[in-house]
Amino acid sequence: MAIVKQVSGRYFSRIETASREEIDEVKLERLRWTVKHAYENNSFYHRALKKAGVTPSDIRSLEDVSKLPFTLKKDLRERYPYGMISVSLEEVVELHASSGTTGKPTVVAYTRGDLENWGELMARTMSMAGVGSGDVLYVALGYHWFTGGLGFHYGGLKLGATVVPAGTGYTRRNITMIRDLGATSVAAVPNYMIRMAEVAGEMGVDLKRDMKVRTALLGAEMWTEEMRRRIESLWGLEAFDVYGMSELYGPGAAGECHVHDGLHVWEDHFLVEIVDPETGEPLGPEEKGVLVVTPLTHEAMPLLRYWTNDITFIYDSRECDCGRTMQRIARITGRADDMLIVNGVNVFPSSIETVLLRVKGVSPNYRVTVYREGGLDKMRIEVEAEENVPPDMYRVLERKLREGLRDVLLMNPRVEVLPPGTLDRVEGGKAKRIIDLRK
């Protein structure tokens, strides 16, 4: 289906407001193509589909996606580096890879068509946040194996924005250049927006007075509504959540509109399901589970029912005040493998952050350590006070935090409020907030 460009208002393409019938027609056509492409051009999927007793001709409706086997991250790692690619290497024009901190990295490949699609998706996502040709887009994300920087870069070029490929680190220089270049939009990891605000204060730069930034495009790590409010308050801007991962091109699989009520999934490129994390059985609307995604337009590396491990749910209604008809998923609350089990209690890091940032006087810089003592699991939460909080108030804050955490976590963690600047900082990458010493 041809996509008609319509760069006006906050819409980038006509499909964003198409009828449900038209969207589903496109999805089914592309789902059938994807299954056929994977079956005919990749030995892993050919064997997996034959084992499942499924052929491409069996895909006659969108519901038939449930007949397909799941694809897990380990499947990509076990076929490192090129085993998941379904085109000749001559057709691959770009490669990215995950960090590989828990094993071999997962390599993702792109054809020219894939890069065109990725740029389109990112242009839609940023246009939805109000970014356009008159903006100076400052990309404070990695330009290397990580897909974040180039995703925003490609989307910004397609929008006609002025793109600044800043990268990460060198925070003082970034503050200076954001100010001097008159950047109106910043793409970054959420915790780096906090770090830049901290450094700006040290430099005597008033973010609201001295900067022109009005939009932050944030993703690549879990962040809460409380973190959004902190960032918006510090910078005087509007922050938008952008969802994606390397296996789904990168950022741009879904994003927020100005309503900030869930993330619109670009359904003409991604078929999403929510499944039970234990059984893999499909769940209904508003039921929280693991997000499973089947990309519908990947040429170099088609994936069938990719198990993301991200926890969310699909909204029951597709109606949104922004006018888009694409379905929405809720903000990611964590990853299934990030959940901590402490003395039999399930704890998501997002629950801890929500409690911490609701207490006035506490900064967004924190660290959670889980350890074993006397045969029992223990949790220690360290969080920095804000700059203007006197040390004699730290004990008061600790008491408030313990009470709030006890009500949410159903346990009594040890809480320490620390002076500002105590905890290590990450200059641009994902924050390492959870340390599990039991492993």
Image: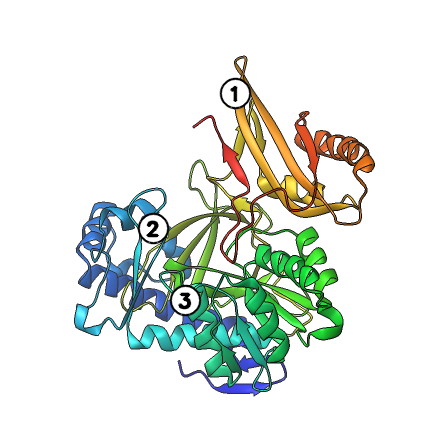
Q: Quadrant of residue 175?
A: bottom right
The three-letter amino acid code for the residue at tag 2 is Lys
Q: Is residue 120 visible?
A: no
What is the distance, in whole Å, between disc 2 and disc 1 at their CAs?
A: 43 Å
Residue corresponding to mark 3: 143
- Residue 19's disc number: none
Closer to the camera in the image, 293 or 378: 378
Q: Residue at x 50, y 72 (%)?
A: 21
Q: Is residue 22 above or below residue 406?
A: below
Which of disc 1 and disc 2 is earlier in sequence?
A: 2
- Residue tagged 1: 372
Q: How far across and down, in percent of the image, does residue 251 sit?
A: 47, 64
Residue 156 position within the rendered picture, expressed as x and y whole percent measured from the top left: 49, 78
Q: Eyeballing the image, is 232 above or below 214? A: above
Foreground mark, 2 or 1, reads 1
Residue highlighted by disc 2: 67
User: What amino acid type is highlighted by mark number 1?
Assistant: Arg
Left or right of residue 103, residue 117 in this image = right
> Residue drawn at (61%, 29%), measured in percent from left and top?
380
Q: Of helix, strand and loop, which one carries label 1?
A: strand
Q: Quadrant of residue 177?
A: bottom right
